[in-house]
Image (spheres, grey):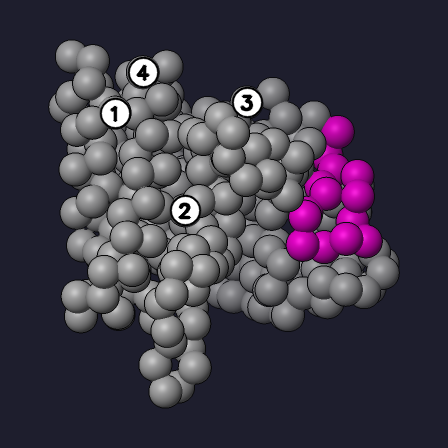
Amino acid sequence: MHTSLVAALDIGGTKIAGALVDGNGAILHRAQRPTPARADGDTVMQAVETVLAGLTASPLWGRATALGIGSAGPVDACAGTVSPVNVPAWRGFPLVDRVSRAVGGLPVTLVGDGVAMTAAEHWQGAARGHDNALCMVVSTGVGGGLVLGGKPYAGPTGNAGHIGHISVDLDGDPCPCGGRGCVERIASGPNIARRALENGWLPGPSGDASAAAVAKAARAGDPVATASYDRAAQALAAGIAATAALVEIEIAVIGGGVAGAGEVLFAPLRRALRDYATLSFAQRLIVAPAVTGTDAGLVGAAAAASLGHGETPVPAGRG
Ligand SMILES: [Zn+2]
């Protein structure tokens, strides 16, 4: 019997979500607020505290034994601080300390959102049963995380698996991170849309120029739209192949809005992987869409807290 619960926070540039999660990964109670991303640091923290109050008010709160936070990065799990790129007022913000005080000293575990999503996919999703995996979120940015030796690997500061900022184009375009030719600079949704527009793709009458609209055009046979997804797939494949060469992953799981393009992305990605993942041990690498969806951040933060707390989450389907 697993009667204890874990509290989870998922902090992003758009929303702050909270939940109480049981030992099977089921969400029993939720709270959510929009992120006042342009406000001062204390105002952002007040939104977090409102979400926490929504959790502590639940009759189930007394069963919570730990709290996990998955936050937009960079994070510093050692220092307990976060500096989310999309929340400018939080730079080195002492989130763990502030959350811990708000919840009466429960043990708090902090990981980056890529690591949280990876923990969720390993616990409940497409990476389940795989001891070595790369999980990626391809949307406005490109994030990721690693499972190594059967466990999510967060790295010393909680940022391991930052595949979006591996350079796959040595003399490529400057990236907002300060690097050049990063996977994200080529494969993120906004960059897929930008490249299609620059090469002459015209949005339909609705004016929708998003990556999803480019995917729709590619599905209808538009060559410029198709080429933009092919290029994104090539960048992702190069990053995945590099990861496979370094740490021998068995599976690459891809989620996020851009993965919603389906075969428009996955077909050229599998083709490009054959070009880049050529070493014998990397050739068996499989690619799969993520399955945990919008709750991945919460479920993963709960898994990270359970692991950080010395417990192993019960695999889905048991318990
Ligand atoms: Zn970069």
Q: Secondary structure at mark 4?
A: helix
Is residue 87 magenta-colored? yes
**234 left or right of 81 in image:** left
Query: Which residue position holds label 4?
Result: 245
Residue nearest the viewer, comparing 19 with 110: 110
Disc 4 from disc 3: Cα separation: 19 Å
Label 2's element?
helix
* Residue 243 placement, left or right of 116: left
Three-letter amino acid code at the position of disc 1: Tyr
Give the crowd class for mark 2: few <14, some 14-19, many >=20 residues within 10 Å.
Answer: many
Q: Residues within 10 Å of mark 4 (few under 14, many from 20)?
A: some
Q: Quadrant of the N terminus?
A: top left
On the image, numbered disc 1 is attached to which residue? 276
Q: CA distance from mark 1 to mark 3?
A: 26 Å
* Residue pointed to by mark 2: 187
User: Along the horizontal axis of the image, is 27 left or right of 318?
Assistant: right
How far apart are the two marked residues, 4 and 1, measured between alpha carbons? 10 Å
Q: Which residues are magenta?
A: 79-93
Q: Is mark 2 within 8 Å of ligand 1?
A: no
State which mark lies toward you, 1 or 3.
1
The tag on residue 155 is 3
